Image (cartoon, rainbow, N blue to C red):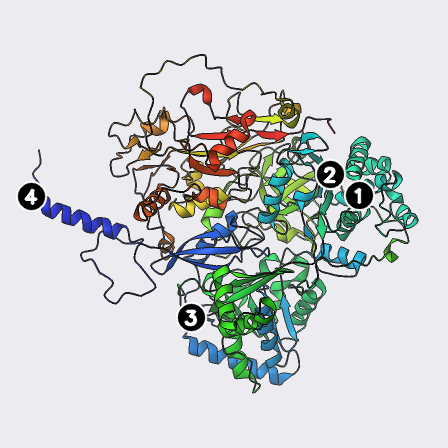
Amino acid sequence: MREGPSISRRAFIKLAATASAAAALPGCEPAARKLIPYVVPDENVVPGVPSFFATTCSECPAGCGVVARIREGRVVKLEGNPEDPIGQGALCARGQATLQGLYNPDRLARPQVRSGDGALRTVSWDDAGKMLGDKLVAASKAGKDRVAYFGAPNGPTFKKIALAFVGACNSSRAIFYEAINQEPARAAAKTLFGRRDLPTYRIDQAEVLISFGADFLETWQSPVELARQYSLFRTPQNWRGALTIGRATYVGPRLSMTASKCDEWIATAPGAQADVAWSVLNVLVKNGKVSPNSGFDLAALTKAVANFDPAATSARTGVPVETITQLGETFGKADGALAIAGTDDSSAHLAAMILNAVTGNFGKTIMFFEDSPAEETSTPDEVDAAIDAMRGGEIDVAFIAGGNPVFTQPPSARMAEALQKVPFVVWAGGVPDETAAMASLLLPAHHPLESWRDTAPRAGIRGLGQPVMQPVFESKPVGDILIAAAAKTSSTKLPWATTAEAVKTEWLALAPKADGSDAEDFWVKVRREGGLFEEQHLSALTLDMSPFKGAVPTAAQMELSVYAYPHIFLYDGRGADKPWLQELPEPVTQIVWDSWAEMHPETARKLGVAKDDVIEIKTEHGAIEAAVLVESTVRPGVIAVPLGQGHRAYGRYAKDVGANAWTILAAGATYAAATARATGKTRKLVTPLGKSDMMGRSIVEAMSIEQLANGVIPKSEGEEVTGPFEMYAPWKYVGHKWGMTIDVNACTGCSACVTACYAENNVPWVGKEGVDNGRIMSWIRIERYFPNEEEAAEAPQLYLAPMLCQQCDHAPCEPVCPVFASYHTEEGLNGQVYNRCVGTRYCENNCPYKVRRFNWFVPEWPAPMNLQLNPDVTVRGAGVMEKCTFCIQRIQFGELNAKTEDRQLRDGEIVTACMQACPTRAITFGDSNDPASAMMRRRDDNKLRTYRALEELNTQPAITYLRDLYREKGKT
């Protein structure tokens, strides 16, 4: 045996303690030589104890409230704010991934100036400020409106700052731009009611729901809030003396995640949703289902829907007459119905609003409120006018902050050309994007988690965003940059010196109308609660019948069309710089790190292409290339392409991934007539999915609402277990036995739980090649299966369910580990001791659920992304197996708190990361030994729906699932 240097036991223990302490500090290289204590400790920071700050999410316009968990001065996790009426404590995958925007290694660290040859050089903030000030002074003296602000909306206070900035620069050009806006819905509201604010929806108050292209579980308006409502809508309840669930229908060209959770998907060509909506209205009018209190002129309505007789609509759209008629009849007789539209034309939105109005559902399932906040975004005409002014040489300085218009604007806008005509372009932001590549001066801006800001998503709700940590880079708030620049440009003094002061001033003005409390007490309260949440009051509506003097025109027909939809995780492209989101499989296609051209097998045959063939999709606006995905989840004659990919800048995780579908669309459009041809190239579409068919296994189970109402338990797909022979004595749990109940009917497949687990448990990403090699590391995955041909008539449209370690009592992983790294705890968990693991992977091979993950390489956390790591969870290394343990760190934290306070652990005190994030509350965690726990009560209340995955294997999982529910075909 080879001799090594001798070391005493005492010295070894000292070294081991030092090394473990250093390893707990994220981003450390080999163990530090010295331990550095808090010599002058911050009185607000207790090492090892988290602090929490309420703020707001900025990943989409919904305006959810969040709570940031801070450890030693850095935010390590975001959760939903329970006080917020929108999120109510839940947070979607994009919100969870906000941390990767904050700590992104490709964020601009210091101001940069572009030289004449296009090269960038770093300058100081003083030099950058002087350069900006000089250019603004010259532009403001050159004439009126020579300065323009162009950026993403960032709340009412920031809007005042931006307007004050352009005003100080002798200009009125302030554009607030969102690539995905609600202009069609606003236009419809203006047409019908003379107002441009958006209504609020209550899906949970409806009995029948029709979505005309609105993906309300994914990206439409407020998906966290609407998903929560939809789960209640689909919860079994007694309606008119019978047990039933809400009836939902989706009308659109693609089986989206939202469509898959509905009872029926009516496949239409893009744009034909409006025809179907007007035809449903035609049925209501003919059947006399127009409420006398709706205020509608029946004769005018009859004339408006004249072109939409079900037979004529069926001939144009291919939707059967019986389907349209049934939709109208069901909608008309429902006790609470709701129609929503998410298309790019106002006609479908108008028809949906009229459907709600004529059935008397305004004030019940859809409502407008008094004191709605001012419109955040500029109108399309205002955006176009600003771009035309740039192109026409009418603007000398353009300040751009957010929105990435070079990437998201249509080719017809010629945005890059317009910016080239502006002598001085300033870009302020995080990760430099395509728009930053056109800028003369690049300024690093604070991330929203480093900034003061506010939101006003709708009447009665004002969110307050506050900095939750010190800036990661040498950045500044955009508002501070604008205020400082305005002060140098104009002699007129602005009312605030900083963004923080502006936000506080605006909010202190709200104190008298809130509850009359002292202003400073009010300021403390709103910061603690994350905003001001007031009672909402319904607004009276005035109907305008003037637009209905003639028949509504029908939609144009196309032989082949391309349909572009927002990616559930990447949205309009802003999420593409976050590797967690890139590696999340899209729920229906299960594809990662790419774009794809989804088409029906019939369309693929006509084009002569197969899966992974690269095709060119061409419209009158431009062309893109994408790999083909052949599935029956798209209507024939339609090619569906996700938005969000195709960046040519925007950091290492987004650059050169996929194709930019914005480049083949007209302004404000989501579809276009197209041609497609094979290029002769291939590109493999990567997915972690194995099979799309369960092959008779009991992984995700479902039952019809009719079976549930009649007390009929469906026959399990798995083999019947007649009487297993037990090799070992059953486990006895004296104290707690942790378990979960997961309602598959409530689960939408949104993957908020997956991303929350990534963030909580320091789960690494592996990239496209790693996923292709079967090395994805997610501890939770969303299982997705299609019903096979035999069961399709009596099954949900898609099987979706979260799959994680089942914490089996008879765990196949435990007895095969040669070093006892996999073991059974006294509280029913399948534990994993990382420093025992030698990487044999026997446990992974023996796990029937395939939920164990092996580290093939040392995970990479490029600085400062290492700062996002949760210090409560060990960061694993190469050769180590890892898996879910029900957030053991949270379990221990709760148990130690109870022990310290000398009391019993309370039910609900421990909340796993996946449970906390879930918008639909599909997951309940608790003690199986406590029959009164919410988790066990949920099982008892749904006994006919309970099942355990692969129960025939007798692994005795600690997770019990509740079967998905569907409505038998043809049942009303």
Q: Residue furthest right?
A: 299
In front of the other: label 3 or label 2? 2
In the image, what residue type sits under mark 4? Ser
Q: Position of residue 902 (x, y in %)?
A: 31, 46
Which residue is the site of mark 4?
6
| 253 w.r.t. 90: above or below | above
Alpha carbon distance from label 1 to label 4: 83 Å
Q: Which mark is residue 121?
A: 3
Q: Do the residues labelled 4 and 2 touch (CB within 8 Å)?
A: no
Which residue is the site of mark 2?
268
- Estimate how packed mark 4 is, as few (under 14), some (14 to 19) or many (20 or more) residues with alpha carbons within 10 Å: few
| 541 w.r.t. 904: above or below | below
Q: Position of residue 932 (x, y in %)?
A: 46, 34
Alpha carbon distance from label 1 to label 2: 10 Å
Q: 507 or 351, which lies in front? A: 507
In the image, what residue type sits under mark 1? Asp
Q: Which mark is residue 275?
A: 1
Q: Position of residue 922 (x, y in %)?
A: 53, 38
Q: 812 or 445, which lies in front? A: 812
Alpha carbon distance from label 4 to label 2: 76 Å
Q: Which of marks 1 and 2 is nearer the N terminus?
A: 2
Q: 571 or 647, which lies in front? A: 571
Residue at x 60%, y 25% (from the top left corner): 703
Alpha carbon distance from label 3 to label 2: 52 Å
- The answer to whether residue 18 is left or right of residue 127 is left
Residue 478 visible? The answer is yes
